[in-house]
Image: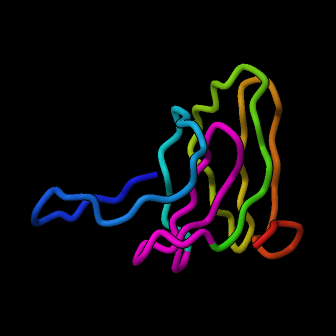
Amino acid sequence: LVALDAATGKTAWQATDDGASYSSPILAGQEVVFLTKQRLVGVSPADGKVTWSHPFRDLLSESATAPLLAGDTLIGSSVSLGSVALKPGDGATK
């Protein structure tokens, strides 16, 4: 995961060594949620600090849907693994 400075185009921060997926990140409250090749992960947009994560690896490495925020519940889905619903901090690791 990489954030770029809008003014300069330089790297502002990098987070995790997870492989990429086809999924787009979403803003959920005060963090950005990514569905990477290995997991769902919450990241602080200010500094790239991982605030929580939950293992969620698609068997074909083809996760393509963006995570969905429904109230305070995050839903992630994949091509071969199915779906998961969780509340960060409730079964997610910090």
Magenta residue span: 29-50
For image coordinates 49% across by 52% down, the residue present is: 25
Question: What count of labels does the image hold?
Answer: 0
| Residue 79 location (% of width, % of height) | 72, 25
The residue lying toward the viewer, choosing from 15 and 46, is: 15
Q: Residue furthest front?
A: 17
Question: Colour mode?
Answer: rainbow
Give left or right: position of 55 versus 26: right
Q: Residue furthest right?
A: 91
For image coordinates 43% across by 75% down, the residue present is: 47
The residue lying toward the viewer, choosing from 81 and 36, is: 36
| Residue 13 location (% of width, % of height) | 37, 64
Q: Residue furthest left?
A: 7
Q: Quadrant of residue 81 in the image?
A: top right
Q: Is residue 71 above or below residue 9?
A: below
| Residue 77 location (% of width, % of height) | 72, 40
Let me know if residue 18 is in the magenta part.
no
Tell me the quarter of the image containing the C terminus: bottom right
Q: Quadrant of residue 21 in the image?
A: top right
| Residue 26 location (% of width, % of height) | 50, 58
The residue lying toward the viewer, choosing from 17 and 64, is: 17
For image coordinates 57% across by 47% down, the residue present is: 17
